[in-house]
Amino acid sequence: MNILIIEKSKVISHILKSTLLAYGYNITEDNAEFSTGNLIKRGLFEIIILDTNLSGKHSTNDILKSIKDCKKIESKILGVCSIGTWKDKVNFLNSGGDDVLSYPFPVQELIARIQSLLRRPNNYVDNKVYFGDILLDTGSKTVSVKNSDVDLRRKEYQLLEYLVRNKNRTVSRCELLDHVWDYRSYTGSNTIDVHIKRLREKLNNKGVIETVHGQGYRVKEFKASSALQDEQSLDHLQS
């Protein structure tokens, strides 16, 4: 399996490369000059690990746009954030990234994130993310259930989108705090619990977000109702 690392920091790039080589992955490095653009367009990489803090001629957003503009590319993009706040991570995800990881990180989490991305099906139609009877529109930041709009607050939406993007994987409370909330502004011990409770009520489905006691939360894949399956199939044919 081929992984591309686009990372400005030589230290972080070396750590990523050494770790992934030890796990048997084929690694290509790019020193943030984006010299591998043509290789990406040929679809040679299953995973692209991208520095979230690139600026200048080849900024992170520019690289994301270049990758996402090529509809044939099915590479999953994992961001590595060594500088910045939760806002930078949210911006990365909103700009087309599939997941983001804060540096420093344990090796086990890096491997788990990659394996989770590899399991994720290419089931996105433009900005639409289907999950059973639930539809997330990542462009307009809206959610509907069985074609009925659901009114979510900003944090509720961000929490749901993160869980759905990591479906079938248990997401720890620490990870949710890291990716949806800013550790430094976090004060309430039950903030996550309150938001999960509200989501379950608003989605009218208490089982959609599963509590994994002592570990975190997990959203499992489930089938849409027959009518919505037909609608989703039509969307895929038209895309």
Image (cartoon, rainbow, N blue to C red):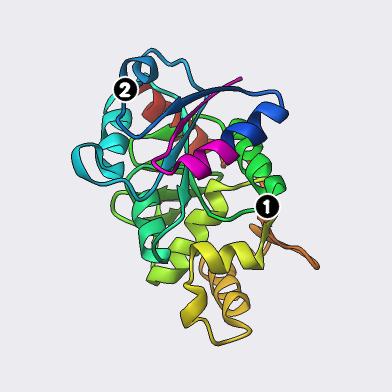
Front residue of this view, candidates 131 and 28: 28
**What type is the residue that disc 1 sits on?**
Pro
As helix, strand or loop, the secondary structure at mark 2 comes to loop
- Give the label on residue 106, or none: 1
Q: Quadrant of the N terminus?
A: top right
Q: Of residues 178 and 188, which is closer to you in this image?
A: 178
Distance CA(mark 1)–CA(mark 2) = 29 Å
Percent x, y of residue 149: 38, 60
Q: Secondary structure at mark 1?
A: loop
Image quadrant where one finds the C terminus:
top left
Type of residue at label 2?
Ser
Few, some or many residues within 10 Å of mark 1 (<14, 14–19, 20+)? few
158 vs 40: above or below: below
The residue under the point 69% across, 46% down is: 107
Residue 35 numbered tag: 2
Residue at (44%, 70%) from the top-left corner?
155
